[in-house]
Structures are given as structure tokens and as C-alpha cells.
Image (cartoon, rainbow, N blue to C red):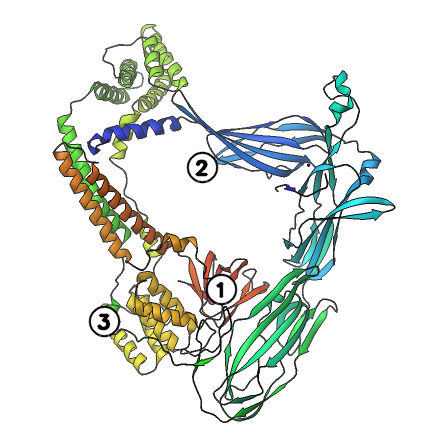
């Protein structure tokens, strides 16, 4: 856990030269191949006192890795930091990462830092064990009385949903400085800082103490007993007099030289135990609101007389202390034949106070009467758990009389972004200033009847796009390769490499006890070294072989091993000592490995010409598949065409739900067509299913974001959504500023055209033995790369847009996947959310900053 500071009181190139580029790549890769991965643990000292901190380092050679600190039980980790260094010496690349941890001993005696596991790219190494002698810190009684810490909680016995305040104080009555703070661990609790550090003075038993105080707001995550661990403070206390720790007793003992000397002092607060109780069973007649705390409710009408067809605004205010942010609109028992009700987005005025969250939540509803006469707005009841009384309570408003006068019925809609309704009817604004309800008719644009809507019309599949994009490059490379092979003679290196491989193959075919095996191995090893040095000769001395390997940057172990192998084989061949089958097999295996290493350049070159084709497109393309309707199956183009026509007829006859289900059944066969998805969204919107309407509009927008009819209908549907999202400009808006201007399929064709244009130019220039990257060549290359980049970004955006839409009218977003998990907040049909994680039949979603929770797949579906 990271220590925090607190404000305490005192401190010119041509593509024909492809082999050159390949050589550069190999030279960059080769040193890394011989780079080993290791980890070393070390400490600055092995004797400390119980109040001291210990700097513990894990030095990793080879790059970043993961250090598992879980076996570390005798020490607590106060802070950590990472430092990286790179070097390149004699052709060898070194990448060193140093992980430094500040440790605090938990007890005295001989403590152990056990072997720790360090993992990198699936490879694991273990550090050594280190023992530390921790002696008891001698703290005077005066110091103990002058510096101490206390922790307390406002209520040690709470229920689920109830909030409590954890207060931590550091008392100091001396000259202390350089304080650092390690917060306690709130395991099993949700905690947030309620206040910043504040400082004041308090008199305790006639002695003045400077008090530093911070408060946290905590809430239980599950029932049970929870212990909040102690907080740890580290401060520096000035040291006066005493013997110099280095043993120098000269004039340096003068007080002037000792004024800046300090020693560390550690202070722990007391642990705090908290009991979190489950809410008792609820048996009341009024539905439980889920609120825990102290609350009141009020209602008001903006007028007491209204004509039929006009609207009157009912304001419901819930105010109190507790989980006020979870308050939803209370049920209103109105006669549906007498009134139409239009919801507005709630307005919150919530702040964190000394007793937890407090404030109010205001709900406004537009009521439109249908018949004249006298009516009564019935009392609204709110049931909550009262934390003071430890029991459920129900509060109620007074009934409100309303006189309804005869008048002409009208259609109510909203002049700006508004709340839910159906078929474009919505009366109340929801963002910015509240706007008056106006009289206005509005509807969505009609569906499309072209039968082409049953054909998949999307972008090129990834394998086809990549293949067409690389086809010009492959043709250019093959033509250059054929030309180079025909015009080039074998050089010395290739000749000796072929000789080494030939003799290795011959040695492998001979019996292991045949004396000719060692002769073949000796010739193969000599040829490989000569190939490495690009030198023509028939034999090599041991010193010549070593010099060639050193000059060409071979590993030190290889420079030693090759001459030793030559000596050993000569001793066996000419010394009269016979070698058994096992020794011969070991020599054959080792020399094969050495020859492979020495001939690495050619091996990598061959591998580059035989790379396997990418095979990741299938899964990415499958991710865009649209789920089939549960109650419909379609097979064959003829069936789809008939179902499409039937769905069009159902839509025109007003059977919107049947039309939507028919369009969904066609989409379930794998058809991905923006016009089909557009029709599906229209049908669901007409059927008053706002959630599914926006879901299918969003799916259509992924395929054709520039469709003006689609964008118009989607914008209209969004005005009916109750939950308003933040529309501030973000990085995605800047990165994809061109989104909607050109489709992905068009971008793919433009990228393929740019590739053809550039490599055609390059082929013509290469045939004429002219430079490729002139002004025109550079321009064509930049254009081709830019088109590929834009197409790739658009494909990535479509593939990574992890969004979902709320389907049900009201969904409780919970803290977990269980039905008993705590409701955190409510969302409503049509709200678009981000998907953070998928687990079985649940989605972890984020609506806005700080609003994250779980919903089921029945309540929300991915776009």
C-alpha cells in the first residue's frame, strides 16, 4: 500500500535491398535471444530495530516481471517503486528492472523474507531466502505519551446499506517531523474519504497536543463481523546527544553537528471491530424502497385547476440522511383511465456530511387528465429502514385535490431532451434548464420495403481484406526475390553453411559407434565457424576459431565451448580412445545446436519466407453475429423473403410487435443489413418497447453510421430515455472525427487501392533500377499507410465498442450477480451503458463515472 504524506506540523533506401533490412532486424533480435531471465533479492542491511523500515529490492535481468509478495508474512509493505535501465555492450543487450519495496517488521526476532516467485512470459524463477534480525525498539515512556494514534467508528453495529464514519487521529505533543501515513485496510467494507486531513489543538490532562484528523465514510459489503486493521504512522524524532553511530567522538559531537540527526518512530492506531447485520425480514404492505437511514417525503402540484389535455406537474421530494442516492420514484396509484403520466429525470442534491450522505432527490411527473371532474392525487408512501429505531418505518404525504375542467385533448411532447413516453409523446425537459411543455406532433420516419434488406451488406471479412491488401506486396516481393536469386551467385557464407548442414545430415545417418561420425561432426563445426566469419579455408586452429567467434559478437560461453569441442573430438579421433554410443549421441546433439546458432541468419531468413497466415479473423467476425429470436427460425432465402414481406404487411396494419419479431427472426439467420436493423428498431419503437428499439438502432448505426433517416429516428428515440448520459467531448470523439462520413467497406476498398497503386509504382521503379522513395514514392507510401490506418481504426472501433442497452422499463443495478446483492442505482429502458465484464448470464456495466454494477442478460443486451 502506498504511503501518503500528511500535513503534520514541522519539513535512401530501396526495396530491392530487402536482405539488408532482414539483416538489421536479425541483428536487433539476436542479442535478445541470448538474454537470460534471472531475479536477485537483496537488502541494504540485515539488522534493524522494530521501528525501522527496510529497503528490499528484487533485481530482474531481462525485462519487466511480476513479483509475488504473498509469502511475505513477517513484514508489511509500506510502499513500492520501479526503476528500469537498459544497456548495449559488445553486441549484448541488457534490460534490468529493479523493484524496491519499503518493508516494516511486524514483530521482533529473526524474521524471514522467504523465497519469492518472479514470473515473466510464463517463465518462473525463485529468489533466495533472507533473514533479518529485528531488535526491540527502545521507546521511552515520554515518547509514548507524546505521540499516539486513535481510531474510532461512529456506530460499531450497523445494517446493510447503513453508513458509518471512521475517524482516525494522530496526537503529538513534541517536536516530530517527516510524517508518512499508511491507511488501514477496509476489507469487507466500501470506504471513501469523507474529509481531508485537518489539524487542530487539544488539551489533554493539562498538556497541549497537535491533532491531525481524517474521516472515512464506510458501508458494509456483506453481513458479518469486520475488523478494520490499524493505521501506521512513521515520523522522525530529533536526536540530541548520545554516541555517534559510526563511532567518531571528536569535535563532531558538538550540538551544531547533531542538530539535524533524527530517528524513526512508528505509531499504530488501535484496530476497530464493526458488526454488519443483515436487514430484518420486511413484512409491510408498502413496497420496501431499499433506503436505509432517516428520510422524509413531500409532494406538491404547480396548480390545482387544469383542463383536460393540459398538464400539471407533480413534484415529489425525498430528503434525508443515508443511501439517498439509491432512492427511486415512489409508486403513484393513479387511475390510468383518468390520467396519463410522463416521467422526468430526477434531480439530485447530495453531499457527504459528518453523518454520511445527506441531501434530497426530486422527481417530477407531468400528469395529463383525460376526463373532467374532481380528482385526488392519492398519498404517496415511502417505506425505509430507520437506523435510529432499528426498524422499518413508512412515511406518507397528504392527498392533494385537483379540479379538472373540460377542454380539448392534445398530444404532449418535449421541446428538448426529455423523459420516457411512447410514440413521441413526452412533456418535460431533463437536462439544463427545465422547459415548458409545448404542443407539437412528431413521429419517426417510415420503414424501408426494399427486399435487399434480407441480404448481408457489410464490410469485407478480415481474411479477405488482409489478403487483398497484401497481394500487391507479395507480388512485388516475389518478383524481387526471383530477380535477386537469378542475378546473385552463392557467397562464401552460404557455401560453408550448406557444407555444415550436409555433413551434419551425413553424421546423423551413420551408426553411433562408426568412427566416421566424429570426422563428419568436426568438418560440420569447422564449416559453421568459417561461415560465421565469411572466410574461405579448409581447416581452423582453436585460436582462429575463437577469434572469429569473438569478432562476430558470439556469446562468451560459445567462444569457449567451440574450441573445447574441437580439442575433445581431436583427442578422441587421434588419441586412440574409442567413444561409446551415448557420448557420440551427445556430441551430435550439441554440435547440431551450435551449428543452428551460428547459422541463425539463414534460418531466420528461411522462416521469414514461410510464416503461417493469420487466423484470427474468424473469431472477430463471429463476435458481430446477432442473436437469433427465441421463438422464430428461418431457413433459406425464399423463407426470409416471405417473412420480410409478411413483416412489412404487419407493420403497415399496426401489428408492430409481430413485425419486429419477424425482422428479428431474419436477423437471427445471420443477416447483417443496416436497413433490416433499422426496420426492426422502428417496429419496436412503434410497439412501445423503447429498450429494444434503441438496441436495434444502435446495431444499425454500427453498420451504417451515416444514414440520415436512422440518425433522425435514433435521436428521437433517445429523447424518450429517462437516464441522461454525459455528452461531453471525449478522446474517442477526437480520434474518430471522420466517423459516419465514409463506411468501413469504402475505407477498405480505398486502402486496397492505395496498396495496389504504391506497389505498382515500386515495381516499375525497381524494374528500371531507380529509387522508389522519391517525392512521389514517399507520397504514395504515406497515402497507402494512412488509408490502412484509418480502415484499421474503424474496424477496431466497431469490434471493441463494448456497449449494451437496458431493455426493461426499470432495472436495479446491483453490487453483485446474486438476487440478494445490494441495489446500487436504477436505470431505465433505452439507456446505453458500457460493458466492463461478462460473467455467465450477467454483465458488469458502467453508466457514468462512479456508477458501476451488475445486471442480467434479461435486463440488458450487448449491441
Q: Residue furthest left?
A: 768
Mark identifier at residue 121: 2
Q: Position of residue 107 (x, y in %)?
A: 72, 35
37 or 571: nearer the viewer: 37
Tally the marks.
Answer: 3
The quarter holding residue 77 reads: top right
Sequence order check: which comes first, mark 1 or mark 3? 3
Mark 1 highlights which residue? 856
* Separation of residues labelled 1 and 2 (CA atoms): 35 Å
Position of the C terminus by quadrant: bottom left
Helix, strand, or loop for circle 1? strand
Sequence order check: which comes first, mark 2 or mark 3? 2
Mark 3 highlights which residue? 451
* Separation of residues labelled 2 and 3 (CA atoms): 53 Å
Relative vertical location of residue 773 with respect to residue 662 in this rendering, above or below:
above
606 or 77: nearer the viewer: 77
655 or 99: nearer the viewer: 99
* Separation of residues labelled 1 and 3 (CA atoms): 35 Å
The quarter holding residue 153 reads: bottom right
Relative vertical location of residue 633 with respect to residue 204 in this rendering, above or below:
below
Please say if the residues under marks 2 and 3 sit with CB atoms less than 8 Å apart: no
Q: Residue furthest right?
A: 206
Q: Residues within 10 Å of mark 1 (few under 14, many from 20)?
A: many
Q: Position of residue 307 (x, y in %)?
A: 51, 90
Q: Is residue 282 visible?
A: no
Please say if the residues under marks 1 and 2 sit with CB atoms less than 8 Å apart: no
Position of the N terminus by quadrant: top right
Q: Position of residue 287 (x, y in %)?
A: 61, 75
Helix, strand, or loop for circle 3? helix
Q: Position of residue 12 (x, y in %)?
A: 24, 31
Amino acid at each position: 500500500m502506498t504511503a501518503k504524506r500528511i500535513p503534520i506540523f514541522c519539513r535512401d533506401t530501396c526495396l530491392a535491398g530487402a536482405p539488408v533490412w532482414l539483416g538489421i532486424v536479425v541483428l536487433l533480435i539476436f542479442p535478445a535471444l541470448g538474454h537470460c531471465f534471472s531475479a536477485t533479492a537483496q537488502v541494504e542491511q540485515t539488522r534493524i530495530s522494530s521501528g525501522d523500515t527496510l529497503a528490499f529490492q528484487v533485481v530482474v535481468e531481462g525485462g519487466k516481471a511480476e513479483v509475488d509478495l504473498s509469502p511475505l508474512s513477517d513484514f508489511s509493505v509500506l510502499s513500492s517503486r520501479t526503476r528500469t535501465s537498459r544497456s548495449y555492450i559488445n553486441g549484448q543487450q541488457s534490460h534490468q528492472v529493479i523493484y524496491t519495496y519499503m518493508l516494516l517488521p511486524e514483530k521482533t526476532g529473526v524474521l524471514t523474507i522467504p523465497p519469492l516467485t518472479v514470473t515473466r512470459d510464463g517463465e518462473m524463477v525463485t529468489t533466495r531466502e533472507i533473514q533479518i534480525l529485528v531488535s526491540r525498539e527502545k521507546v521511552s515512556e515520554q515518547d509514548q505519551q507524546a505521540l499516539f494514534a486513535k481510531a474510532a467508528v461512529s456506530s460499531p453495529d450497523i445494517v446493510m446499506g447503513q453508513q458509518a464514519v471512521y475517524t482516525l487521529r494522530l496526537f503529538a505533543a513534541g517536536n516530530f517531523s517527516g510524517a508518512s501515513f499508511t491507511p488501514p485496510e477496509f476489507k469487507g467494507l466500501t470506504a471513501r474519504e469523507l474529509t481531508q486531513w485537518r489539524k487542530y489543538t487539544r488539551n489533554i490532562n493539562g498538556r497541549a497536543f497537535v491533532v491531525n484528523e481524517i474521516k472515512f465514510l464506510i458501508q458494509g459489503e456483506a453481513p458479518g463481523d469486520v475488523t478494520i486493521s490499524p493505521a501506521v504512522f512513521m515520523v522522525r524524532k530529533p536526536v540530541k546527544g548520545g554516541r555517534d553511530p559510526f563511532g567518531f567522538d571528536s569535535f563532531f559531537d558538538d550540538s551544531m553537528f547533531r542538530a539535524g540527526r533524527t530517528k524513526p518512530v512508528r505509531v499504530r492506531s488501535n484496530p476497530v471491530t464493526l458488526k454488519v447485520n443483515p436487514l430484518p425480514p420486511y413484512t409491510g404492505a408498502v413496497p420496501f424502497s431499499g433506503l436505509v437511514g432517516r428520510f422524509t417525503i413531500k409532494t406538491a402540484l404547480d396548480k390545482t385547476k387544469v383542463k383536460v389535455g393540459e398538464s400539471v406537474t407533480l413534484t415529489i421530494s425525498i430528503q434525508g440522511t443515508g443511501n439517498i442516492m439509491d432512492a427511486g420514484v415512489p409508486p403513484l396509484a393513479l387511475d390510468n383511465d383518468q390520467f396519463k403520466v410522463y416521467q422526468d429525470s430526477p434531480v439530485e442534491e447530495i453531499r457527504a456530511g459528518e453523518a454520511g450522505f445527506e441531501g434530497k432527490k426530486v422527481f417530477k411527473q407531468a400528469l395529463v387528465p383525460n376526463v373532467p371532474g374532481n380528482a385526488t392525487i392519492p398519498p404517496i408512501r415511502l417505506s425505509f429502514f430507520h437506523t435510529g429505531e432499528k426498524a422499518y418505518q413508512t412515511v406518507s404525504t397528504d392527498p392533494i385535490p385537483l379540479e379538472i375542467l373540460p377542454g380539448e385533448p392534445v398530444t404532449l411532447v418535449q421541446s428538448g431532451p426529455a423523459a420516457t413516453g411512447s410514440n413521441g409523446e413526452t412533456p418535460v425537459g431533463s437536462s439544463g434548464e427545465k422547459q415548458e411543455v409545448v404542443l407539437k406532433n412528431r413521429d419517426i420516419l417510415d420503414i424501408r420495403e426494399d427486399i435487399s434488406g434480407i441480404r448481408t451488406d457489410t464490410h469485407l471479412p478480415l481474411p479477405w481484406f488482409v489478403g487483398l491488401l497484401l497481394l500487391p506486396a507479395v507480388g512485388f516481393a516475389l518478383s524481387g526475390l526471383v530477380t535477386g536469386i537469378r542475378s546473385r551467385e552463392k557467397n562464401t557464407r552460404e557455401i560453408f553453411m550448406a557444407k555444415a548442414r550436409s555433413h551434419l545430415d551425413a553424421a546423423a545417418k551413420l551408426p553411433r559407434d562408426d568412427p566416421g561420425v566424429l570426422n563428419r561432426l568436426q568438418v560440420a563445426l569447422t564449416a559453421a565457424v568459417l561461415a560465421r566469419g565469411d572466410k574461405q579455408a579448409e581447416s581452423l586452429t582453436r585460436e582462429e576459431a575463437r577469434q572469429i567467434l569473438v569478432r562476430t559478437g558470439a556469446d562468451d560461453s560459445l567462444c569457449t565451448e567451440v574450441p573445447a569441442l574441437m580439442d575433445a573430438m581431436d583427442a578422441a579421433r587421434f588419441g586412440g580412445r574409442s567413444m561409446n554410443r551415448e557420448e557420440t549421441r551427445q556430441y551430435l546433439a550439441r554440435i547440431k545446436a551450435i551449428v543452428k546458432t551460428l547459422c541463425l541468419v539463414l534460418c531466420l531468413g528461411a522462416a521469414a519466407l514461410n510464416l503461417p497466415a493469420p487466423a484470427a479473423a474468424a473469431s472477430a467476425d463471429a463476435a458481430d453475429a446477432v442473436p437469433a429470436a427465441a421463438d422464430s427460425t428461418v431457413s433459406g432465402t425464399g423463407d426470409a423473403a416471405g417473412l420480410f414481406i409478411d413483416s412489412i404487411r404487419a407493420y403497415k396494419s399496426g401489428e408492430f410487435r409481430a413485425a419486429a419479431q419477424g425482422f428479428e427472426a431474419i436477423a437471427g439467420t445471420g443477416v447483417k443489413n443496416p436497413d433490416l436493423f433499422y426496420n426492426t428498431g422502428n417496429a419496436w419503437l412503434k410497439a412501445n418497447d423503447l429498450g429494444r428499439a434503441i438496441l436495434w438502432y444502435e446495431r444499425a448505426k454500427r453498420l451504417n453510421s451515416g444514414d440520415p433517416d436512422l440518425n433522425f429516428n435514433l435521436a428521437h428515440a433517445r429523447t424518450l430515455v429517462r437516464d441522461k448520459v454525459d455528452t461531453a467531448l471525449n478522446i474517442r470523439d477526437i480520434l474518430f472525427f471522420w466517423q459516419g462520413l465514409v463506411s468501413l467497406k469504402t475505407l477498405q476498398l480505398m486502402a486496397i487501392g492505395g496498396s495496389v497503386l504504391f506497389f505498382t509504382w515500386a515495381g516499375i521503379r525497381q524494374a528500371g533500377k531507380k529509387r522508389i522513395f522519391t517525392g512521389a514514392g514517399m507520397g504514395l507510401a504515406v497515402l497507402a499507410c494512412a488509408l490502412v490506418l484509418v480502415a484499421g481504426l474503424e474496424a477496431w472501433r466497431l469490434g471493441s465498442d463494448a456497449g449494451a442497452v437496458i431493455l426493461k422499463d426499470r432495472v436495479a443495478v446491483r453490487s453483485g450477480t446474486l438476487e440478494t446483492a445490494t441495489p446500487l442505482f436504477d436505470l431505465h429502458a433505452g439507456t446505453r451503458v458500457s460493458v466492463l465484464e461478462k460473467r455467465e448470464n450477467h454483465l458488469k456495466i458502467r453508466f457514468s463515472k462512479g456508477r458501476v454494477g451488475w445486471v442480467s442478460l434479461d435486463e440488458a443486451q450487448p449491441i
